[in-house]
Amino acid sequence: MVRLLDKEINDKLEEIINYIKKTDCFKNYIKAKEILEARDDLKDIIKNIKKNQQKIVKNPKLKNELEKIINENLEVLESDITYLSYKNSLDEVNNLLTIFENKINKYFDEVFR
């Protein structure tokens, strides 16, 4: 019984995933991600931001100094059309996923009242 239920759930999840993969916003996200990944300069900036964020967590005394560097890097990223395109497409996909999540939660709320 459990295996049958697991299969049914997985099949339905696969349907949702396939639907999402066919949307324009997901396709745009994949294209934007590929373009971003081809830009070593942007990848280096992103790695540098993450590295400095980790340093802040490990040593909060460096926060002011490292936040300045992080903010400078963010300014460079946010002035780049490739990064902005990626960021916007990622936001669209996340919004779509939130819609699905809300619909599923609403469905369960209504069923189990």
Image (cartoon, grey):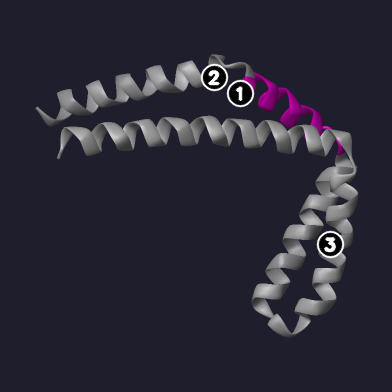
Which numbered dot is residue 21? Answer: 2
x then y, percent, for residue 106: 30, 35
Q: In which quadrant of the rendered image does the C terminus lie? A: top left
> What residue do we see at 39% from left, 17% from top?
15
Mark 2, secondary structure of its residue: helix
Mark 1, secondary structure of its residue: helix
The tag earlier along the polypeptide, 3 or 2, is 2
x then y, percent, for residue 4: 16, 23
Which numbered dot is residue 10? Answer: none
Compute the Cα span from label 3 to label 1.
29 Å
Amino acid tagged 2: Lys
x then y, percent, for residue 49: 78, 59
**Position above or below: 4 against 75:** above
Residue for badge 1: 26
Of tags 3 and 2, which is closer to the observer?
3
Compute the Cα span from label 3 to label 2.
33 Å
Dots 3, 1 in contact, CB < 8 A: no
* Location of residue 11 (image quadrant): top left
Can residue 18 be found in the magenta stretch? Answer: no
The tag earlier along the polypeptide, 1 or 2, is 2
The tag earlier along the polypeptide, 3 or 1, is 1
| Left or right relative to 23: residue 2 | left
**Position above or below: 91 against 45:** above
Which numbered dot is residue 71? Answer: 3
* Location of residue 31 (image quadrant): top right
Amino acid tagged 1: Phe
> What residue do we see at 83% from left, 32% from top?
38
x then y, percent, for residue 110: 21, 34
Boundaries of the magenta span = 25-39
Look at the magenta stretch and give its main secondary structure.
helix
Can residue 29 be found in the magenta stretch? Answer: yes
